[in-house]
């Protein structure tokens, strides 16, 4: 993985926290990172070139007025005022190369002086057991603070540890072993069509990222929520607000482009297409 600085930019060495999405159902992690970049008014510092990420290109995603700057698959945004670096990933990883991509990201984070990584992602609603929606959308988390994945700060914020995390389960053990650079037997993980329900969570991109960042000695916090395919803007706000609370970013709950609140990226105007023609009804 190679990091290329924008012309005239220089790296901010005081940006010790990294936020990035892990691609999953509904693209919720990417939408949440969109909100954070736009609302914090972060500037693009450069982009990452990795052989395991599929190429893509588009127009400026944030504006407020598109300038014709190309948006690329892996972009880095940072600001010395927020002391944050945000990575936006716009295209998926080549099938079968997620662990290698996660290793590359961990190498980049460690070499650029990051100490805390926040991974934002979503989980398939069909996998949620004992559903309780009485309190609305719920944040699940996974942390490297303790071996069982718990974190006192996250618990104080009222979030629930991902109960499906079990470091002794074969999928999580496999990820940990590979992330640490140890050799594993080829049959230590089942093939894709042999995966059981217990293998669902360690098979997701956030799990590979969590294991590889942790293996590098970095503090890792995964913020997760369950969703289905469709309009996932509410879940994106929910996860972005969770990241703001965790890191003390001071973003309030105002939704819109009002001062001090969330700034809706201009690219969201075409997120789900135009509204229906009401004359049809």
Image (cartoon, helix red, strand yellow):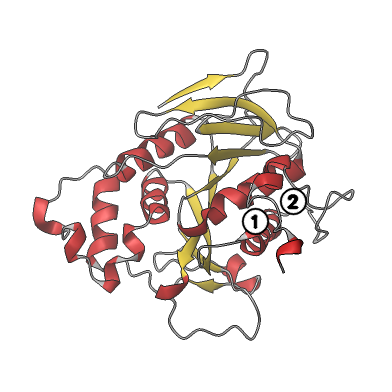
Q: Which residue is drawn at 63% across and 58% down?
A: 236
Residue 126 vs 191, above or below: the answer is below
Quadrant of the drawing holding the N terminus: top left
Q: Name the residue under label 1.
A: 243
Q: Name the residue under label 2.
A: 249
Mark closer to the chain start, 2 or 1:
1
- Front residue (pair 155, 171): 171
Q: What's the mark number on residue 195? A: none
21 sits to left or right of 49: right
User: How many C-alpha atoms fall within 10 Å of the one at disc 2: few (<14), some, or many (≥20)?
Assistant: some
Q: Which residue lies furthest to the top in this view?
A: 8
Question: How far apart in space, not on screen, are marks 2 and 1 (Cα)?
Answer: 8 Å
For the point 51% across and 39% down, the residue is 90
Q: Do the residues labelled 2 and 1 touch (CB within 8 Å)?
A: yes
Q: In this view, does 258 lie to the left or right of 180?
A: right
For residue 183, above or below residue 221: above
- Where residue 173 sits in the image (x, y, percent)? 25, 60
- Residue shown at the point (24%, 52%) measured from the top left: 177
């Amino acid at each position: 993985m190679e990091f290329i600085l924008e012309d005239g930019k220089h790296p901010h060495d005081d940006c010790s926290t990294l936020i990035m999405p892990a691609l999953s159902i509904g693209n919720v992690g990417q939408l949440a990172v969109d909100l954070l970049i736009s609302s914090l008014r972060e500037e693009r510092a450069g982009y990452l070139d990795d052989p395991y990420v599929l190429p893509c290109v588009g127009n400026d995603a944030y504006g407020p007025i598109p300038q014709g700057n190309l948006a690329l698959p892996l972009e880095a945004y940072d600001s010395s005022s927020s002391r944050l670096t945000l990575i936006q990933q716009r295209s998926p990883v080549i099938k079968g190369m997620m662990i290698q991509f996660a290793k590359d990201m961990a190498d980049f984070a460690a070499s650029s002086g990051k100490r805390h990584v926040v991974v934002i992602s979503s989980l398939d609603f069909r996998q949620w057991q004992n559903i309780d929606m009485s309190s609305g959308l719920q944040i699940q988390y996974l942390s490297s603070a303790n071996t069982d994945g718990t974190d006192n700060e996250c618990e104080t914020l009222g979030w629930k540890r991902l109960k499906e995390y079990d470091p002794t389960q074969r999928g999580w053990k496999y990820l940990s072993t590979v992330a640490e650079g140890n050799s594993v037997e080829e049959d230590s993980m089942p093939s894709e069509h042999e995966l059981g329900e217990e293998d669902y969570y360690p098979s997701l991109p956030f799990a590979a990222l969590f294991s590889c960042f942790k293996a590098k000695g970095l503090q890792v916090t995964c913020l997760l929520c369950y969703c289905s395919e469709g309009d996932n803007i509410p879940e994106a706000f929910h996860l972005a607000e969770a990241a703001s609370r965790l890191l003390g970013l001071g973003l309030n709950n105002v939704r819109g482009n009002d001062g001090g609140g969330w700034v809706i990226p201009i690219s969201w105007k075409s997120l789900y297409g135009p509204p229906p023609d009401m004359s049809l009804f």
